[in-house]
Image: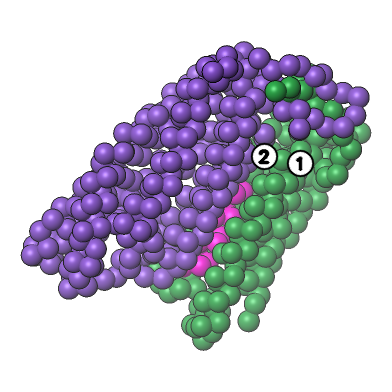
Chain colours: A purple, B green
Amino acid sequence: MSRRWDEKRELWIGWWTLVVFYNLYGLLFFVVARTQPPPKPSLDPSEIVQWFADRRDGLLYGYAIVSIVGGATAIMNATLAYTMRRMSVSRAFAYSYLVIYALATLPGMLIMGVVCTVGAMRPDRDPELLSWLYDFAFLSFEGTMGVFLVGSLVWMVAVLLDRNRVFPKWFGYLNLCNALTEVVVAPAWIFKRGVFAWDGVIAWWINMAVFVTYTAVFLTLLRRMIVREDFGTGPLPELESDRAPGPAGTLEAAR
Amino acid sequence: MRTVEGRASGVRFVPGQPDMWAFVLFEALVFTSYFTVYVIRRTQSPDLFLQSQAHLDLRVGVFNTLVLLLSSWSVARCVHAAREGSFRAALADAYLTMLFGFVFLASKVREWAAAIAQGFSFTTDEFFSFYYFLTAIHFLHLLIGFVVLGVAVHQSRSFAGRSPELVETCATYWHTIDFLWVLIFALLYVMR
């Protein structure tokens, strides 16, 4: 095993955890539990009873796995916070990011999972109670949007202020785009139907398209950052393949 | 693996940081998707949208548009002055842009207050949901624009590290806000 691999092994473990987790998250929420894309908020109690009955096994098994792998978010958040520690900015950015995404895990994943499981576990419950659980689960999921909003802004400011070129500036601006689409989810607390409801084209579909793009971008940039990492404190070296043509630019062997 | 440190200074293809143009492109895509949804929904309920649209005051919309176009003019002057090294003039133009921005914000708040007083809220009907949504998300972009203009002011006031490129970057953001408003104005106030 090379020295370079030894130095970067922990970061690669973090990166692969991110990749595997996001894929697993998509599989569990979209395919197994089938809670995403979200169902209509306008369902009446009898339809909600049917909704729980239709996916009972998926909810029970899916969220059992979610509860097992949920702890992986600690590794993911730490890896992302590492990027801010590598920047020239205050450590407060990394700490803020860690705390805020640790909070996001609760409403966006664990509470939603537990509440859906409670609903699926005893399908003979009073339909009014199941309706209550249904609303609670999906509003809890929506509740993470404010956290993602602030988290994206923290990352944005860190990237824009950073002098170590850990990420390109356009990624800072992309964080702003992501933050602004999180704001758009806010009407989901008010509407039960239409494009602004929690299953609406604007509140969910467009928001999800932006989030998936954003996630794919930061996973790619994070991978490049790990490749470029020299474990120093100054600017991160650029990859040779990114070197602009011209007389400027100093070649340096990576460690 | 070999790496390279430092960036070669290449030919500039766009004013300001190219990174900001990535933001402009992405925001344009996001807003295009909002506009597309609006137009589709409008096509599905043309009577409802027309009836509700009639309650908007076109004169206020025109006034707001003119104010923002004036702010585009002043921020363009700011860039021109910064490029020539006249940072005092650039500072004055940045403040003038802020003033136009404040006028727009005040006018928009007044318009919202008037609409609410007439009983048209966010949940009144689908047209007003879109009206408040599109104008509010634009309002939020404008608020961020004040932070961006603050950077232009800082660049113009600071005697160290003045960067015309950064002023251009700020102006790019501000022009984007204006551009988006013109489209919102056309869709909400003018389109029949």
* Residue B142 is one of the magenta-drawn residues: yes
Task: Give the chain of mark 2.
Answer: A
Q: Is residue A72 above or below residue B177?
A: above
| Vertical placement of residue A51 versus B81, above or below | below
Give the amino acid at mark 2.
Answer: Trp
Chain letter belonging to callout 1 = B
Query: Mark number for residue B93?
Result: none
User: Based on the displayed image, in which of its 4 quarters is residue B97 positioned?
Assistant: top right
Measuring from the top left, give residue A193's x and y in whole percent: 36, 70
| Segment colored magenta | B129-143
Q: Position of residue A233 (x, y in %)?
A: 62, 13
Residue at mark 1 = B18
The answer to whether mark 1 and mark 2 are in CB contact below 8 A is yes
Indicate whether B126 appears above or below A78: below
Question: What residue sits right under mark 2 in the picture?
Answer: A170
Kindly state the secondary structure of the residue where label 2 is placed: helix
Residue A113 visible here: no
The prevailing secondary structure element of the residues shown in magenta is helix
Identity of the amino acid at label 1? Pro
Left or right of B171, for residue A129? left
| Depth check, front residue: A23 or B80 | A23
Say whether residue A181 is left or right of residue B166. Answer: left
Instruction: Name the residue located 47 percent from the left edge and 61 percent from the top edge.
Output: A205
Q: Nearer the viewer, residue A170 or A146?
A: A170
Q: CA distance from mark 1 to mark 2?
A: 8 Å
